[in-house]
Amino acid sequence: MERKDQLIKIFSRTIRDILLKAPVDFEHVQEIRLRVGMPLMLILDNQEYYLTGEGALSAAREEAYIVGRTEIKETIEHISCHSLYAFEEEIRQGFLTIQGGHRIGIAGKVVLDDSGIRTMKYISFLNVRLAHQILGCGDGIMPYLYKNGQVLHTLIISPPRCGKTTLLRDIIRQLSDGARGIKGVAVGVVDERSEIGACYQGEPQNQVGCRTDILDCCPKAKGMMMLIRTMSPAVIAVDEIGSREDLEAMEYVMNCGCKLVATVHGNSVEDIRQKPILRKLVQDRLFERYIVLDGCKEVGHVGGIYDSNMVSLA
């Protein structure tokens, strides 16, 4: 009940009352969606539901409670503690992170200046993404990430919503704290979207290990270079690589003798081969382990583990 109480206090009074009545376990709720003039929606165990004014789950849109602009405004005031100006930098990024590690995506009218996005106003859309940790979900693959006691360059390949970030977080925790008799190492995390550590006022809300340093809300390519120069990590971890800048930074990290653990969207190693920027990763055998998630059973379910030559290990 503590998790539910902690979360619903950010919503407007009306929506708070609806959520209090909802017959759901918030440990299984993934998203709560608010859009002005549109139905109140909830994602539960990867299934989409409408919420009625009485808090019931429904598949019928006409039964859904319709979110008003006043409720969006009141919710934003609660999220920002009535000081939206103090969150201006986060607003430019398009999301806010609150206590507990929950992330609120925001959308509305973007205000530009010569340097890019200055702020956002007329915020009309909110996506509350609940933070979830599954401690130990990486237990089964940790033995494959070491060779002679040394961490291997590892790429996690996963379709959306199959738990790659959750798995990456647990791998970071175990690398940092140590696992199975192997001593923990310093891990640097570039958490561009505040999803790995879910930092709130600089403090990680998720368990990421005692030897982990985090660059929060920092672009991946710049962050990797910064960590190498300043924090002396043995391992750098990043989520959702994909740009040419990311590739160049990863090569720099590897050439510095630092190990890399990363994730990427995809369905298979062959899928990665078809992407022009990422093809080089496979061709040059930069990664020593590939973990492929299939999402067919539970979060972080592994469909295959391969070495740098694409030989199946599990």
Image (cartoon, rainbow, N blue to C red):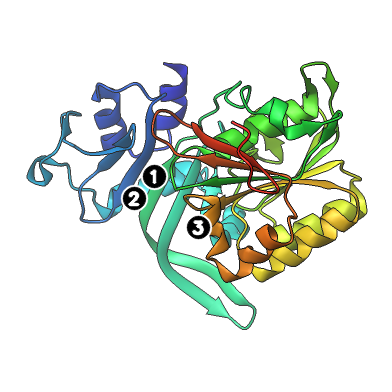
> What residue is shown at x 70% (from left), y 48% (from top)?
308
Q: Amino acid at mark 1?
A: Thr
Query: Whole-percent x and y of residue 245?
Result: 70, 68
In the image, 16 versus 104, the foreground residue is 104
Q: CA distance from mark 3 to mark 1?
A: 41 Å
> Mark 3: which amino acid?
Asp
Task: Say if mark 2 contacts mark 1, CB within 8 Å.
Answer: yes
Q: 178 or 140: which is nearer to us?
A: 140
> Residue 309 appears at what percent x and percent y?
69, 49
Q: Secondary structure at mark 2?
A: helix
**Image x and y of residue 123, in percent:** 39, 60
Q: Report, in whole angstroms, how far the alpha carbon at label 2 lies from the one at label 1.
A: 5 Å
Q: Earlier in the sequence, mark 3 or mark 1?
A: 1
Q: Which mark is residue 271?
A: 3
**Mark 3 crowdedness (10 Å alpha carbons): few <14, some 14-19, many ≥20:** few
Residue 21 in the image: above or below residue 150: above
Q: Residue at x 74, y 61 (%)?
A: 284
**Residue 176, position as x, y percentages in the image:** 79, 29
> In the rendered view, does 19 fall on the left or right side of 4?
left
Residue at 41%, 61% (x, y): give it: 107
Which callout, 3 or 1, points to the residue nearer the camera? 3
In the picture, measured across the screen, residue 165 lies left or right of residue 153, that is: left
Q: Quadrant of the C terminus?
A: top right
Q: Is residue 96 above or below residue 14?
A: below
Examine the rendered structure and indicate whether residue 124 appears above or below residue 243.
above
Q: Give the residue number, with chain letter if any, for mark 1.
A: 75
If you read the primary sequence from the N terminus, does the residue marked by circle 3 or circle 2 appear first? 2
Q: Quadrant of the N terminus?
A: top left
| Residue extending farthest bottom | 114
Residue occupied by mark 2:
72
The answer to whether residue 83 is visible is no
